[in-house]
């Protein structure tokens, strides 16, 4: 007998649906109580919501009285006001322009998530796409009417603020994180100061400062566009948080990786960009995703300086005296839009984590 | 006597208050194969890590191939290009495939074209007998295979000197031999200057030109392997040898 014993198949799972339910839902008194409680909560809340949102809802009413009479949700209000909510104060007849701009932005973001495009072509896609967005939004050439950016609003504005906020804060935050770990005292101090100062201040006050205080310091007759100032404030704010997230990742990389790179004679830049950062960023994908979601939602704080993003346009839509009292419907609608984007980011980050996992599992 | 390629002159180093290297003097001839042994904490790893500046010495001079190691980054880079290092824990890059691990240095440091770098990489993978693993990730390989990849990675840089820092200490016993065989092959081929921190005395007997014994930051004794093992002079050496050669 010299042959190895035959390997056996694993035992087949013998649990049927009833056994599964017994095991997972009613295995102990506590588990039973929790199961019953959860079912009760769902039963209590779901039917009334469905009745309000779908069964009794009015989708086509043309006046608010008619809508209110139905006793359910008044989705007709959204039908009346969606253009104001989505595009803010952008001239009504020209609203196809921000619509296309938003579609272009979303398309660019989706293209950027595909690994096949992670090369130089992505740069051209973005430069080209952003030129199209700028032309559409501002106009002034190709026979398009010029639209000042104080009139921009709604979803395209939210997308612009958050896309640039994330895209520019990312490299800036990485540099700050590297700076904070630098051995050069001047650079290190500067980065620590920046990160701690910005993190110690609420975004609202930074937006407020950028809008109210900054012009006081600038020479007379010299002004920076309000939207640009808000954008810069968002970038600076996000970068400080990003730096700390990235630093966490950098600290998780074993010393041996640095030494391995050093022993090959790689320069600092090569070591960081080929060896350390790819691994560090992979580790911090979950907190990075949270941060990006937060930046996306925090852009709604620009209302404080009178910029009409998605949230503020919705508020404006609610002030119409002919359609008073439909704030629940409006906020459900806006929440759904925010949710779609945030959930998309979350799903993508999970997908990315799986896709980039190489080394650590066998 | 051939010219020396590494010179350590009264090298001293401290970790805080702890005097880890005490007045080290060492001359290594071109092509010489040296095994360094000693109890843990004796400074043997620290010494060879000073040679490619993974550790900084605080007093004394280190010359590698005629270039003195100073804070000048240019010198450090020049020396690291000539000195390959194999680590106890391999230090492969887990996010890159084996082939990418091997070609990264040649492409970016030696500025070789990618095709040429890959050809060299495959040559060395053949030499360490794992060409079939080229497109796997390090995490998919066994410890012995990973260490052989690490040796190949160093060789791809075409170094004049190879430093081995306890290359078999982290391996499962049955994998030690495959790594040692590669190292023995490399040593017997000649031409390569090798400094190896190891407790594999069989390896030392077989290929070393000189065995160095270190204890508490000092070089206590150095001799040819025959003399070193059969006739150790210092009592600390005798004690150490009695502990590791059962």
Image (cartoon, coloured by chain):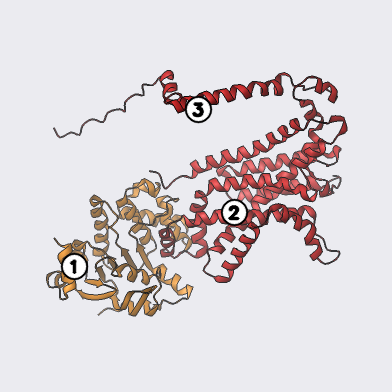
Chain colours: A red, B orange
Q: Which residue is mark 2?
A: A242
Q: Quadrant of residue A180?
A: bottom right
For mark 3, name the chain: A
Q: Position of residue B201 (x, y in %)?
A: 19, 63
Image quadrant in which you'd find residue A12? top left
Q: Report, in whole angstroms, how far the alpha carbon at label 1 lies from the one at label 3.
A: 65 Å
Vertical arrangement, residue B129 with respect to residue A51, above or below: below
Q: Tell me which numbered mark, 2 or 3, is placed earlier along the sequence.
A: 3
Q: Height in image: A262 above or below A161? A: below
Q: CA distance from mark 2 to mark 3?
A: 39 Å
Which of the labelled discs sits on residue A34, or is there none?
Answer: 3
Residue at the spot 68% in from the left edge and 41% down from the top edge = A106
As drawn, the label of residue B193 is none
Tell me residue A287's x, y (percent). Answer: 55, 47
Q: Residue at x 42, y 48 (%)?
A: A359
Q: CA distance from mark 2 to mark 1?
A: 52 Å
Which of the two residues, A201 or A177, is positioned nearer the viewer here? A201
Image position, residue B219 (x, y; %): 26, 75
State the image coordinates of residue A108 (x, y, percent, origin top left): 66, 43
Q: Is residue A75 left or right of residue A8?
A: right
Q: Nearer the viewer, mark 2 or mark 3?
A: 3
Front position among marks 1 and 3: 3
Q: Which chain does tag 2 point to?
A: A
Query: What secondary structure is marked by label 3?
Result: helix
State the residue position of label 1.
Answer: B240
- Above or below for A144 versus A28: below
Helix, strand or loop at mark 1: helix
């Amino acid at each position: 007998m010299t042959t190895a014993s035959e390997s056996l198949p694993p035992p087949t799972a013998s649990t049927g649906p009833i056994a599964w339910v017994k095991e997972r839902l009613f295995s102990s008194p506590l588990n039973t109580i929790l199961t019953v409680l959860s079912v009760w909560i769902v039963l209590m809340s779901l039917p009334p919501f469905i009745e309000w949102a779908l069964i009794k809802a009015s989708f086509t009413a043309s006046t608010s009285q008619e809508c209110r009479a139905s006793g359910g949700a008044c989705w007709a209000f959204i039908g009346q006001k969606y253009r104001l909510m989505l595009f803010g104060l952008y001239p009504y007849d020209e609203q196809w322009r921000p619509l296309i701009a938003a579609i272009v932005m979303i398309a660019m973001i989706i293209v950027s998530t595909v690994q096949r495009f992670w090369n130089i072509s992505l740069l051209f896609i973005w430069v080209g796409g952003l030129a199209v967005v700028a032309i559409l939004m501002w106009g002034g050439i190709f026979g398009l009417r010029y639209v000042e950016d104080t009139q921009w609003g709604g979803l395209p504005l939210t997308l612009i603020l958050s896309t640039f906020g994330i895209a520019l804060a990312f490299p800036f935050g990485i540099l700050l994180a590297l700076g904070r770990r630098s051995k050069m005292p001047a650079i290190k101090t500067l980065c620590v100061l920046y990160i701690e100062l910005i993190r110690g201040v609420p975004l609202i006050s930074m937006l407020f400062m950028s809008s109210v205080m900054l012009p006081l310091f600038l020479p007379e007759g010299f002004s920076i566009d309000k939207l640009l100032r808000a954008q810069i404030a968002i970038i600076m704010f996000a970068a400080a948080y990003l730096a700390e997230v990235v630093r966490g990742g950098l600290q998780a990389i074993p010393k041996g990786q640095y030494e391995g790179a050093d022993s090959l004679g790689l320069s600092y830049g090569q070591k960081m960009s080929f060896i350390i950062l790819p691994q560090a960023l992979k580790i911090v994908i979950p907190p990075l995703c949270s941060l990006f979601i937060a930046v996306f939602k925090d852009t709604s704080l620009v209302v404080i300086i009178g910029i009409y993003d998605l949230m503020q346009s919705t508020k404006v839509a609610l002030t119409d005296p002919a359609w008073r009292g439909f704030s629940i419907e409006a906020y459900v609608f806006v929440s759904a839009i925010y949710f779609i984007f945030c959930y998309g980011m979350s799903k993508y980050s999970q997908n990315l984590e799986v896709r980039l996992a190489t080394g650590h599992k066998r | 006597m051939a010219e020396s390629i590494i010179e350590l002159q009264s090298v001293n180093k401290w970790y805080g208050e702890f005097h880890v290297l005490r007045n080290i003097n060492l001359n290594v001839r071109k092509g010489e194969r040296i095994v360094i042994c000693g109890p843990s904490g004796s400074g043997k790893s620290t010494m060879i890590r000073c040679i490619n500046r993974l550790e900084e010495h605080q007093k004394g001079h280190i010359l590698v191939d005629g270039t003195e190691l100073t804070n000048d980054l240019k010198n450090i880079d020049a020396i690291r290009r000539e000195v390959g290092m194999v680590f106890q824990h391999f230090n492969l890059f887990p996010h890159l495939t084996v082939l990418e691990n091997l070609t990264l240095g040649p492409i970016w440091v030696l500025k070789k074209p990618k095709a040429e770098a890959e050809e060299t990489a495959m040559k060395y993978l053949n030499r360490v007998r794992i060409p079939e693993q080229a497109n796997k990730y390090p995490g998919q390989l066994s410890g012995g295979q990973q260490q052989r990849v690490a040796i190949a990675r160093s060789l791809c840089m075409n170094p004049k000197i190879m430093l081995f820092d306890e290359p078999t200490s982290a391996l499962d016993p049955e994998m030690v031999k495959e790594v040692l065989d590669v190292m023995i092959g490399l040593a017997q081929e000649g031409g390569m200057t090798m400094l190896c921190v190891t407790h594999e005395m069989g390896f030392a007997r077989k290929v070393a030109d000189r065995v160095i014994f270190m204890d508490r930051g000092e070089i206590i004794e150095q001799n040819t392997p025959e003399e070193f093992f059969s006739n150790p002079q210092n009592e600390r050496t005798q004690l150490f040898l009695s502990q590791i050669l059962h």
